[in-house]
Amino acid sequence: MTTLLIVEDQALVRDAIAALLDLEDGFTVVGKCANGKQALTWLREQPVPDIVLTDIEMPQMSGLELVQHIAKQGLPCISVFMTTFAKPGYIKRAMALGAKGFILKEADSDYLISALQRISGGQRVIDPELALMALDDTNPLSDKEQQALKLASDGLKTNDIAQQLFLSQGTVRNYLSEAISKLDATNRVDAARIARQKGWL
């Protein structure tokens, strides 16, 4: 029996997926969470499931951040992403995090069940077209530039960003300036918008 934790911020979608999988032989949904932060708390308090099926874009903590934490903590569960957004940066980051599946929400229920069955059997399931899209994606931003840009897009001022990243304000300004230049953006807000559209933040 394959146990699953469903992490999805839309209650109707979350409940519908859980109900669908609970009806299928071989699957048991042991938990449902509305975001990555809730899921981390759940994982600390409950037996680790076989599969964490998570959305990407969620409030408080994204699915990508959740899977990063899962990897850091060495939790023995398989991560599978399910999203509406086929952004190249998302797919590339998901693959880099060791995700075993990337499923679009437009897929029908038979595909979802089949994909999860193959994943629980040890296979990786990512649509070939999505995998090629990820391979063709080139993110020009460095890790520090991405971190600074993400914090800036969250509304933090240069001083606050510097404190969070343990850098000088001048270094943060340089990172933001480089990001703006690389993305051919007009300012940090525009740069963050472009980076988010690509799935780099």
Image (cartoon, rainbow, N blue to C red):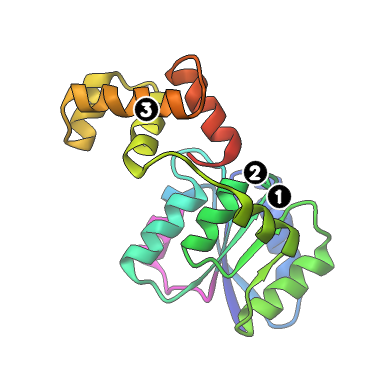
Q: Nearer the viewer, residue 200 or 24?
A: 200
Let me know if residue 170 appears in the view.
Answer: yes
Question: Which residue type carries mark 3?
Answer: Glu
Dividing the picture into quadrants, the one containing residue 164 is top left
Tag 2 residue: 10
Point out the tag, 2 or 3, that comes first from the N-terminus: 2
Of labels 1 and 3, the one closer to you: 3
* Lateral position of residue 113 relative to residue 91, left or right: right
Tag 1 residue: 13
Query: Which residue: 38% across, 65% down?
Result: 71
Question: Which residue type carries mark 1?
Answer: Val
Query: Which residue: 70% across, 79% down?
Result: 117
Q: Which stretch did the figure color magenta?
A: 39-51
Q: Nearer the viewer, residue 107 or 7?
A: 107
Element at label 3 = helix
Is there a contact, CB below 8 Å, between mark 1 and mark 2? yes
Q: Quadrant of the N terminus?
A: bottom right
Dividing the picture into quadrants, the one containing residue 26 is bottom right
